[in-house]
Amino acid sequence: MKQKNFSEIYLQVIMFLITVFLFSGCMSGKQGKLSSLDYYKNGEFFYPWEDFNPETDDVIKWSLTRKQEKWPDFVPLPDDIPEVVERVDGERIFATFIGHATVLIQHNGVNIITDPVFSDRASPVSWAGPKRVQAPGVPLEKLPPIDIVLITHDHYDHLDIKSIVKINEKHKPLFIVPEGIDKILIKNGVSNIKTLLWWESFSNNSVTIHLVPSKHWSKRGAIGRNRTLWGSFVIQSIYHNIFFIGDSGFGPHLQKIAERFGSMRLSFLPLGAYLPEWFMKKQHMSPEDAIETHIILKSQQSIGIHFDTFPLADEGYGDGTKRLERYLQKKGMDKDVFIPLKAGKRLEIN
């Protein structure tokens, strides 16, 4: 009996430490440039429009008192997953949901992958932490040639070193990342990196990538919160604006993005990791928040991300999509304007 109790306590401590790592970064040394920013002070980035500062005590409280709804151990992929195409030219957009925040975006001859996480766990270790319940909708080895990798921030469910190393070795893409993430990539053999601050951009012949604000935070370890920047991306071509949010709470930054870029042809917005709201609301969106974001951005169409892949928060599997459907009905909106794609499925905009 004593041994059982000790094992339970030991497992609880291990899971708490992983939670701190997961919901918890490295600085490039550009102190002169950074010191002029209105969202950087004393070596840390911060969200400037509202008082938002997640405390470690909150993580401890949640991890020790959480009541998570049930998730399945395994969810099979759909039977009718389409074959991945190599390129999509011109104004067409092919968006393939791979899982969580990993999306393949093909547009105007460019292949972009977002926050690539193909590992079994969103964790600093392979033997514990949130385990994916569904395989990636497109296996890493079956990706088409990848030109650009977008990484929104340093949390383990968005920055997976094993996946990044494999993609870098096979595809040699350009990695576009917020300030400070470059150091993590360089330590792991990646050299083709473009680092951005909020509102900065990078252009090639096909698209311009803008890093824009999000209401979140960064930490990749037990100490060093907010040493790296986080953000969302606007992918802009001569045809369309495409918005990829990554992680963000609902806030005034969204209206500022809308004012600067106008309407979005397609947005990728989160549907999961929103409970308990006392802890999650400032850093993640509920499905209702995602729909309101869709409206603010005047998005013609949106696709759900960040749901039904890793059990990160306390809502149950499938709860996000049910809330999405109910709120769309309440707002009198067509369900086709905001789609929770199944892993491996593709939306084609022609």
Image (spheres, grey):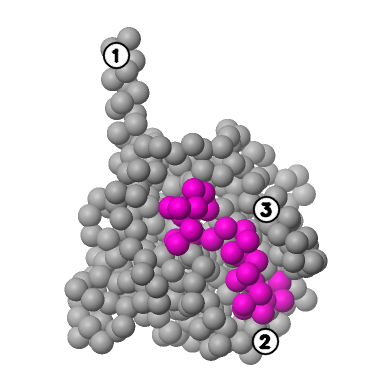
What residue does disc 3 label? 323
Report x, y in % for residue 99: 58, 53
Residue 276 vs residue 27: left or right?
right
What residue does disc 2 label? 239
- Upstream in the sequence, badge 1 or badge 2? 1
Disc 2 secondary structure class: loop
- Disc assigned to residue 3: 1
**Magenta segment: does it hold 292?**
yes
Residue shown at 61% from the left, 42% from the top: 317
* In front: label 1 or label 2: 1
Task: Note whether 115 is above or below 279 in the view shown.
Answer: below
Residue shown at 34% from the left, 31% from the top: 12
The residue segment tinted magenta is 273-301
User: Quick one: quadrant of the N terminus?
Assistant: top left
Residue shown at 59% from the left, 64% from the top: 289
* In front: label 3 or label 1: 3
Res 267 → quadrant? bottom right
Q: Residues within 10 Å of mark 2 (few under 14, many from 20)?
A: few
Residue 328 vs residue 207: left or right?
right
Report x, y in % for residue 252: 49, 77
Residue type for callout 2:
Tyr
State how many labels appear. 3
Residue 134 in sight from this viewpoint: no
Report x, y in % for residue 162: 40, 52
